[in-house]
Image: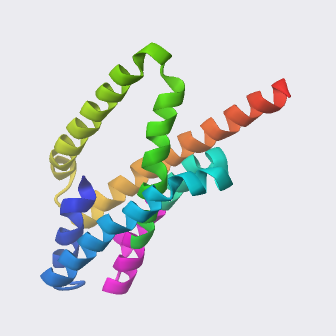
Amino acid sequence: MPMSFKIPALVVQEKLGTVSEVSALTGVLNLVGIPVGASFGFFFKKLHDKIFPLGFALVAIGFFIIALAGNFIMLSIGCLILGIGFGLGVPYMYNWLDWSAPANSVNLATTIVLVLVNVGCAISPMIINAVTPSAKMGLLISAIFFACFLVYAIIHYLRVHKKQSATA
């Protein structure tokens, strides 16, 4: 994932902090998503499928803030927002997979998605480094990708609610 290797590179390239600060920040980034993900059921009951576009809006905003951070505090705020976004968006995607896959193929679909996510996590650093050696640009590429994913999430949300209102 770009955030795992580009955030430390960004801190070094832009002189935003020390190695120990980056280490602590990376740990916090990963830990933020855990309670948010664990609270997914609570948030889902309140927000329903609005959680999909909201989660990926937060991820895109987090990546933009991180990429454009001028100091360690802004970088930390971006990481906090990014962690919350992933904590909301990722559990929704796996639930969506369960809802949309044919009943007798849920295990196969989950396996395929998990394998593809792992392959994507493995090759994305190589692809982003081939496109740009700049940490800032790599994080901006990630922000743009998630902004595109946000557009899809909004379209999906509107399409689902248009169908629901038409059948009601």
Which residue is located at x 60 percent, y 50 percent?
Answer: 44
- Asked which colour scheme the image uses, the reply is rainbow
Majority secondary structure of magenta residues: helix
Residue 14 on the magenta span:
no
Q: Quadrant of residue 154?
A: top right
Counting from the top left corner in percent of width and height, residue 17 is at 21, 85
Q: For the magenta stretch, what is the residue range?
A: 59-79
Asked if residue 9 can be seen in this view, the reply is yes
Which residue is located at x 21 percent, y 83 percent?
Answer: 21
Find the residue positioned furthest to the top.
104
Disc count in the image?
0
Which residue is located at x 33 percent, y 20 percent?
Answer: 108
Asked if residue 71 can be seen in this view, the reply is no
- Depth check: 155 or 141 in front? 155
Q: Quadrant of residue 114?
A: top left
* Location of residue 50 with respect to 72 vertically, above or below: above
Which quadrant holds the C terminus? top right
Find the residue positioned furthest to the right.
168
Counting from the top left corner in percent of width and height, residue 79 is at 37, 70
Q: In this view, does 111 lie to the left or right of 164?
A: left
Counting from the top left corner in percent of width and height, residue 96 is at 51, 35
Which residue is located at x 42 percent, y 22 percent?
Answer: 106
Q: In this view, does 146 lie to the left or right of 164?
A: left
Counting from the top left corner in percent of width and height, residue 86 is at 42, 56
Q: Quadrant of residue 84?
A: bottom left
* Location of residue 79 with respect to 131 vertically, above or below: below
Q: In this view, does 13 lie to the left or right of 29?
A: left
Residue 67 on the magenta span:
yes
- Depth check: 148 or 157 in front? 157
